[in-house]
Image: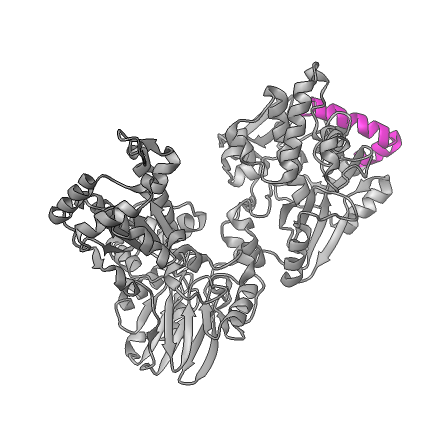
Amino acid sequence: MRVLLLLRGSAGCGKSTWIEQNGLEPYTLSADEIRLMYASPTLNVCGEECISQLNDTKVWKTLFQILESRMERGEFTVIDATNSKTSEMKRYAELCNRYRYRIYCVDFTDIPIEETKRRNKMRPIVKQVPETVIDNMYARFATQKIPSGITIIKPDELSKVWFKPMDVSEYDAVHFVGDVHGCYTALKEAIGDVTEKPNELFVFCGDYTDRGVENAEVVKELLRIYKEPNVYLIEGNHEKHMWVWANDGTTGSKEFEMHTRAQLESASFTKKDVRKLYRSFGQCAYYIYRGKTILATHGGLSTLPNNLTLVATDQMIKGSGNYSDADVVDQSFCENTDAYQVHGHRNLKGNPIQTCRAFNLEGNVEFGGSIRVVSFVGNEIKVSEFKNNIYLPTEERIDYTAKIKKNESVADAILALRANKQVVEKQFGDISSFNFSKQAFFDKIWDEQTIRARGLYINIPKGKIVARGYTKFFNVNERPETKFDMLQHKLKFPVTAYVKENGFLGLVSYNEIDDSLFVTTKSNPDGNYASWLKEMIDKKIPVDTQQKMKEFSGENNVTFVFECIDMQRDPHIIDYPENHLFLLDIVYNELKFKKFSYDELISVADKFGLEHKERAVVINDWQTFFDWYYTVTAPDYLYNNRHIEGFVVEDADGYMVKLKLAYYNLWKYLRGVSYKVLKRGHLDGKETSSLTTPLMNQYYAWLKRIYAETEDKESIPRDICSLRKLFYASDEGRNFTKEENDND
């Protein structure tokens, strides 16, 4: 929790012994320990070893950097230093004010100076200090006072610091309210007017704003009630956005910036009011009620520790384990304790409110779900859900899918595309290609135009789409709207997962200018990739079939979208024993993205003798999708005994996301490592720190050795498929049991 202990006393006063006796070593920052990190013991003029203070500027800079990092997470922290100067202690006090910490000074200065000198002589030589230093220290203690605002305790008064349960049995009822998320109407239905119920205690479990449409109303209500004695507000993870806004900052949250901010700024309350509200938020609620021990946090803990003060605020907010572990955490809590737990924040599996003595109050209220409430009323426990009917539909939230205006003409689209600085136009006679820029890709500048500018070819004079690929869609967890926890609200079931092949995208359509097949990639019909695609088409598709495809494309105004696998000229991450042309989709040449159904696709593919994408699985509900997701994302996952890039997940409304698998991500990263090693022979220090597995490190060591031993550097393969085969054939690679060359 947000507690800082400053130890104050000279060398030999017993600070280190006190830390050890109270088991506080894991929570302690020691100036001497950091000094020893910067420099080994040195010899003084008397020939004795001592701790050098020559690096103290760096030492104190390091200590404060570590301290601030801990404070950002709300870690309980002890500072083991003399803390003899008022100015030093004020610096700590300022940090505590910034990070909402309670600050205590454990005062050892009343230990007689003679006793500290005696103890000093009994310390190891390296830790002893000259007696003159102790004299000066005590003189300073007498004149340098502890600043106001810092609570002073004696070493035997540590229990005053600890967070203890509060007995609230005098209340007729204790109500715990789940995540509100800007849903004022549902909140009022759930709690009514708390000021009219002074004999009932109301505990709110955090996440008061964001995603809902009544954020200002919620904040206004909290400002009205937060000082009431029967109201307690716990901090959630979304409150940080409100705090940043109240301090005139900009959050990193698209949700807040696009929706919540405007609502708050149009309200009657001030940012000063909100800052006061934020400072009232507690980190947890720990009560005894009618013989029941109850712990309430935002995220949920896996047990009730003997000392809650030692638990970081960040863990109370986010909860134990991963975001998806809420049910496991609740089960563990019930197994590990006899207490009751209440939390919100996470409920990916759509679990009910109660699991034994644990209550999950995340009810997805902002998506049309419910505000959940658990009430301890005398000896009874009641659970309630209050449906929210005032919310923004998922499809109207932050959705970067291109939204084509009704009745928008191709001419209008051309003007809009050309007006966007992040869209690149390339002209090929009368036909122009439109694609998002490199800057848009790397800086993630996604809007209506950059998203639809992906393999879009338009005959400019005629104002007609000649060919088009996909509207840009994203990986799971790549964008706010594709975060896994958001997908449970976004996806419309049934959901279909298709195998994602690993090559380059090819487009084939009808070119009425010269009555031919228009063969191209996303951006260039005259480039190498388009040329390779043409060769593959000539090899795999008979001339008469090509003619029929041309006619089909022209008659139906569609584009054949292919995944092109060329292992000789363009190997990617996944190895294939031969080249392929996989028909992915047949897309209509229209502004609004529309394509053939999978059954229609198969029918056309069979008609023309084309390979087509593979449907892996159809999933009918979120729970099944949840289980499938965690199965396929496991490091050792194989699809039908082979490695694949991943899946394209498509829901019942045509919404698509990409899911890249562990094997692909690993070797894509190692491909980048290979580029660097084959260019300069090694990685630098920072780069090697990202090699986090034995395989990654072994591969790097092997490649570095190959580079050093090979005289003709150009003879070393550059593509990762060939390098991977060589690695697994080497002595280093044979140490790994996985066989990666099954497709050889």
User: Does residue 314 lie above or below 169 as drawn?
Assistant: above
Q: Nearer the viewer, residue 717 or 604?
A: 717
Q: Quadrant of residue 343?
A: bottom left
Tell me, yes or no, whether the highlighted magenta stretch contains residue 526.
Answer: yes
User: Does residue 662 lie above or below 286 as drawn?
Assistant: above
Q: Which segment is the magenta one?
A: 524-551
Q: Is residue 397 visible?
A: yes
Q: What scheme was used to colour the molecule?
A: one colour
Q: Nearer the viewer, residue 139 or 678?
A: 139
Q: Nearer the viewer, residue 275 or 676?
A: 676
* Quadrant occupied by the N terminus: bottom left
Q: Residue at x 81, y 44 (%)?
A: 604
Counting from the top left corner in percent of width and height, residue 714 is at: 70, 16
Tell me, yes or no, whether the highlighted magenta stretch contains residue 329.
Answer: no
Counting from the top left corner in percent of width and height, residue 359 is at: 49, 71
User: Does residue 526 lie above or below 630 as drawn?
Assistant: above
Counting from the top left corner in percent of width and height, residue 516 is at: 78, 27
Residue 315 shown left or right of residue 509 in the figure: left
Give the farthest residue toward the bottom. 379
Q: Quadrant of residue 434?
A: top right
Q: Is residue 651 visible?
A: no
Counting from the top left corner in percent of width and height, residue 128 is at: 28, 41
Name the chief secondary structure element in magenta. helix
Q: Nearer the viewer, residue 173 or 84?
A: 84
User: Does residue 205 lie above or below 475 as drawn?
Assistant: below
Residue 7 shown left or right of residue 717 in the figure: left
Q: Residue at x 30, y 74 (%)?
A: 230
Residue 68 shown left or right of residue 351 in the figure: left
Give the farthest residue toward the left. 143
* Quadrant occupied by the C terminus: top right
